[in-house]
Image (cartoon, rainbow, N blue to C red):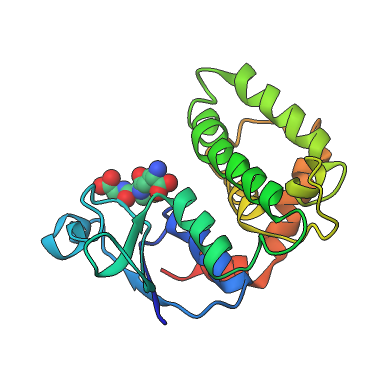
Amino acid sequence: MSLTLYGAARSRASMVRWYLEEKEIAYQWISLDLGAGEHRQPAFLAINPFGKVPALVDDSLAGPDGQPLKLFESGAILQHLAEQHGQEFAGTGGAARRSLSLQWLLFANASFGPALIQAAAKPEDLERQLTILDALLSAGPSLLGAAGSETTAAGWGAADCAIQSYLAYLPLFCPQVDLAPFPHVQASIDATRQRPAYQLAMGQG
Ligand SMILES: N[C@@H](CCC(=O)N[C@@H](CS)C(=O)NCC(=O)O)C(=O)O
């Protein structure tokens, strides 16, 4: 079995890389030079026709073409890893946990990420989301646990990886946002930055 992750420095691939490092899942890292247009070359377009990173090739499963499974979209890759390699949804409560994981991954990529990008134009949208996240994080660092999952063991997982990654981007993308009213968000950012696997994933290109 082998996993190959295609990414680039300072890209969303870092999120996926953090997950793999944190869970100690073996993978090969291929760093593309976006400036040189490596992501627009035929070899990579055969993996992700949209020419974006991250992309994953997982030879433990076959895709519809009979070749090793190729995936793009960070949220889909994280959910795949959680299910196939992270054993996140086994046992009692697994089905609910899987659905909640998907909910938070989609929220991270479709709602929270865009709110960060549009923070200058729509500050009230980001503030509202931060208020809710701060309240949820006050119940514990894992959103799956805080969101009312039936499971007893609320370990760190793909959903946490995505949300915590975007939260850690917040001071970089939106330095104008005052985090003083959001102490649990601030604590989450501080804790994320302390994690060796996060540092490794963010620090190496
Ligand atoms: N929604 C996609 C976004 C992928 C994306 O936009 N990736 C950027 C890097 S963060 C990229 O590949 N940019 C290169 C380009 O667009 O030319 C995901 O979450 O994977």
* Residue 182 image-quadrant placement: top right
Q: Is residue 36 visible?
A: no
In the image: residue 29, left or right of residue 134: left
Question: How many numbered badges does the structure rendering display?
Answer: 0
The residue nearer to you, when weighing 42 against 176, is 42
Residue 121, given in percent of the width and then of the height, sits at 50, 18
Please provide percent x and percent y for residue 135: 82, 34
The residue at 76%/53% (across/down) is: 93
Taking 69 as reference, is 163 above or below it? above
Residues 59 and 130: in front is: 59
Q: Position of residue 119 (x, y in %)?
A: 54, 26
Q: Residue at x 75, y 29 (%)?
A: 132
- Which residue is more in the foreground, 120 or 143? 143
Residue at image coords 61%, 31%: 176
Q: Is residue 21 visible?
A: yes
| Quadrant holding the N terminus | bottom left
Give the quadrant of the C terminus. Answer: bottom left
Q: Position of residue 160 (x, y in %)?
A: 66, 52
Instruction: Kindly identify the residue that appears in the image at 86 percent across and 41 percent down.
Output: 138
Q: Residue furthest left?
A: 42
Nearest the eye: 33 or 105: 105
User: Left or right of 108: which side holds 66?
Assistant: left
